Amino acid sequence: MTNHLFDAFRARMPAPERPLMRTDDGRALSYGDMLTRSAQLAHALTRLNVRPGDRVAVQVEKSPEALMLYLACVRAGAVFLPLNTAYTLAELGYFFGDAEPRLVVCDPARAVDIATLAAKSGADTATLGRAGEGSLMELASGQPGDFDTIARRPDDLAAILYTSGTTGRSKGAMLTHENLASNARVLVDEWRFSAGDVLIHALPIFHTHGLFVATNVILMAGASMLFETKFDPARIVSLLPQATSLMGVPTFYVRLLQQSGLDREAARNIRLFVSGSAPLLAETHRAWRERTGHAILERYGMTETNMNTSNPYDGERRAGTVGFPLPGVALRIADPEGGGGVLPAGEVGMIEVKGPNVFAGYWRMPEKTKAEFRDDGFFITGDLGLVDPDGYVHIVGRGKDLIISGGYNIYPKELESEIDALPGVFESAIIGVAHPDFGEGVTAVVVRSPGASITAEDILAAIAPRMARYKHPKRVIFVDELPRNTMGKVQKNVLRETYKDLYALPVR
Ligand code: MLC
Ligand code: AMP
């Protein structure tokens, strides 16, 4: 039986005794262990009535078992649906209702609340803790160590990852086996990964970057990783000599630069530093080069598209650009207004992409899917950019109202709706303001209702149980009125200019 994604990993798998990962609590997992554990977990999923095509929603702390659960879903033909550990019950309720998972896997500490919520959508619940404890591994440990991997075609779904919508509801991006396999294969080749590589993996595994870019590349190369459950900059510097590569969001590099131990000697065995998920400042790129001798390779991707472009492995990695379209990816700059005609080189417009990396659409939202694709199959990214005379793609802004803080996306509309609904608030505008650590800091600009005295603390306390912590405003500013244009639209650009120095001082 062929299972498109798992067979692609298996085809390049090294000898079973070769290491796949070493964890920060000293555990080691070989490729053989990966096969056994993922097989046992695939049996456990089957025992829990997960059938091919069923969604398995997973909100658990980072652990080797959590990664094995991803592979078990692939092997069992299920659709893996990872969820940010910061999501509140209110946020989870929406995802469960929309995705209708067969099974929800959560941390034992949240089991009671989540099981109640999951049951409302008809899902069963199993638990998996940071150290592998919980009902799921208990069931898995008694299962056989081999599994007849379920057949899956290239266009079958492997995962659904939710991305927040600019106009409200979160959308589930449907990613196929071929989306993931093709992208991993291309990245392995472009970035020259091989079995001898050791990647420092310190990203969360519920997003494209940590789950697909980092993990799939390692699996596809038969390489290994130092699997860190959290990003601790001092520890990362101490691990550098044992590694050949690091992948991170710009905040990683900003924080690592504050470590006195970061120098050429520490980075002597590294061959590749990769950054993505948010813009890497040219000054961070330069500072990194001075300190370590390495030019960070910046690449550009999205949940919906996996990776689209990359600076070259050989050749100039140009600061402030995201490099060239990856092999197999067609990229064009289109007129964001008036029907999307393709613009001449050098002009700023909407970045549109097409290729085997581009997702199959939004889960149960055919209208939204249709709206974000052109008739000829190009996906409208929402990012504004240009292609320079040398072919490098530059991202110059966003056509979508989105804030990226430390690599996490925050959709202003979602926060504005919550804040506007509070008694004492007349209206609000959420903006991203340059932030030395997170890249952009979420900032709330609020107009009180006449006579009201609501405070910043009141607002933060009200949203705390409803929204993930990383979405919370770092500052709340009260104003008498919001600036508007003649059409009555709030001028967020004016607000961003007014508050551009709000976080100017280094935070740490
Ligand atoms: C944590 N906090 C954040 C935050 N991360 N606030 C805003 N933005 C963030 N990204 C909050 C915490 O809740 C805490 O709040 C306070 O900030 C300080 O926390 P910390 O200890 O400094 O944070 P830390 O745990 O170290 O996390 C920072 C981080 C993390 C950078 C390591 O955010 C991270 O792992 N980011 C990576 C995200 C990622 O993987 N993105 C890829 C998306 S895929 P308080 O108030 O409790 O103190 C994608 C596609 C592509 O975009 O192209 O790759
Ligand atoms: P997400 O929806 O979390 O996958 O975020 C995708 C968005 O992150 C893209 O649409 C871009 O706006 C942004 N992004 C990813 N990589 C980069 C990069 N290297 N430079 C600038 N923005 C990036």
Image (spheres, rainbow, N blue to C red):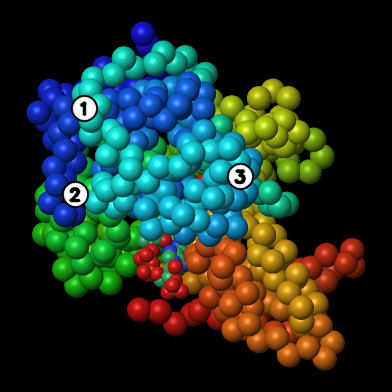
Residue at position x 37%, y 35% in the image: 70
Residue 294 in sight in this render: no
Q: Where's residue 138, x and y in %?
A: 27, 39
N-terminal of the pair, mark 1 or mark 2, is 2
Residue 188 placement, left or right of 481? left
The label nearer to you, 1 versus 2, is 1
Per the model, the C-alpha gap separating discs 1 and 2 is: 18 Å
Residue at position x 56%, y 32% in the image: 174
Residue at position x 52%, y 18% in the image: 155
Circle 3 is placed at which residue position?
120
N-terminal of the pair, mark 3 or mark 2, is 2
Q: Where's residue 401, x and y in %?
A: 67, 57
Name the amino acid type tagged 3: Lys
Per the model, the C-alpha gap separating discs 3 and 2 is: 36 Å
The label nearer to you, 3 versus 2, is 3
Instruction: Give the image quadrant in which the ligand numbered 1 is located.
Output: bottom left
What is the crowding at mark 2: few (fewer than 14 residues within 10 Å), some, or many (at least 20)? some
N-terminal of the pair, mark 1 or mark 3, is 1
Placement of the N terminus among the 4 image quadrants: top left
Disc ID at residue 36: 1
Helix, strand or loop at label 1? It is helix
CB contact under 8 Å: marks 1 and 3: no
Circle 2 is placed at which residue position?
23
Name the amino acid type tagged 1: Thr
Which of these two is toward me, 463 or 244?
Answer: 463
What is the crowding at mark 3: few (fewer than 14 residues within 10 Å), some, or many (at least 20)? some
Q: Quadrant of residue 379?
A: top right
Q: Quadrant of residue 66?
A: top left
Which of these two is toward me, 391 or 137?
Answer: 137
Q: Please say if 199 is above or below 378.
A: below
Residue at position x 71%, y 52% in the image: 168
Residue 381 placement, left or right of 252? right
